[in-house]
Amino acid sequence: MEQLEKDFWEIIQTVADEVDQLFLGINEGINEMVDTFFEFAEEITDQLQESIATDIATDIEDYFNGITEPLFDHYWEMEDMVGDMDSAFPYPVEATPEKNPACMGCMHYHGQAYGGNLLVCAMHPHGWDDENCPDRE
C-alpha cells in the first residue's frame, strides 16, 4: 500500500512539473512575440527616418506620431491582455508564522497559488488551523 501511495504522489508531482513547463513555454512565446513587435516598430522607424527629408522636421514628427501612436496603443492593449493572463500562472507562496504556521518546514508543503487559489498541501488543501498538524513531516 505504501508503494501505491508513493507512486501516486510521484505521478502527481510529474503532472505538476509538466504543467509548469507548459506555462513557462507559453510565457516565453509571449515574450518573443513582444520582442518581435518592438523590432518591427524599430525597423519602421528607421525606414521612415531615412526616407523623409530632414528639412521638414515638423512634418516628420507629425507623421511619426501618427504611425507610432496606434502601434503603441496596440502594444498597451497587448500588455493588458498579458497582465490579465499572468493571474492564471502558478506562483509560489511561502508559509509564514501568520499564515499556515504548521506548514513552515514541512516536506508536504506545496505552496503554489493557481489562479489566485493557494494549494497548501494535498492532505490539507486550505492549510491547518493551528501549529500542530498531524501530518507534518
Image: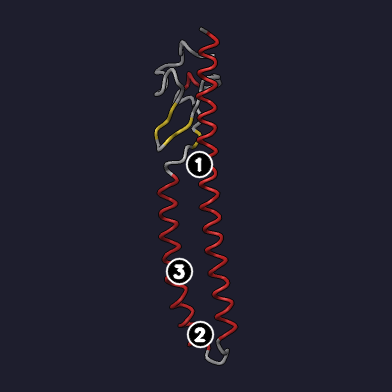
- Classed neighbour count for the residue bearing mark 2: other residues with Cα under 10 Å, few (<14), some (14–19), many (≥20): some
Q: Which amino acid does label 3 sit on?
A: Leu
* Amino acid marked by disc 1: Phe
Q: Which residue is rendered at x = 53% and y = 69% of the image? A: 41
- Between the C-alphas of marks 2 and 3, the distance is 17 Å
Instruction: Check disc 2 and report the residue beneath it.
Output: 60
Disc 1 to disc 2: CB gap under 8 Å: no
Which of the marked residues, 1 or 2, is nearer the chain's N terminus?
A: 1
Q: In this view, does 131 lie above or below 97?
A: above
Residue drawn 54% across and 32% down?
17
Spatial CA span between label 1 and label 3: 27 Å
Q: In which quarter of the image is residue 3?
A: top right
Residue 35 sits in quarter: bottom right
Q: Identify which amino acid the numbered label 2 is placed on.
A: Ile
- Image mark count: 3
Q: In which quarter of the image is the C terminus?
A: top right
Q: Name the residue under label 3.
A: 71
Mark number, residue 23 = 1
Q: Residue furthest bottom?
A: 55
Disc 2 is placed on an element classified as helix
Q: Which of marks 2 and 3 is in front?
A: 3
In terms of depth relative to the viewer, which is nearer, 54 or 28? 28
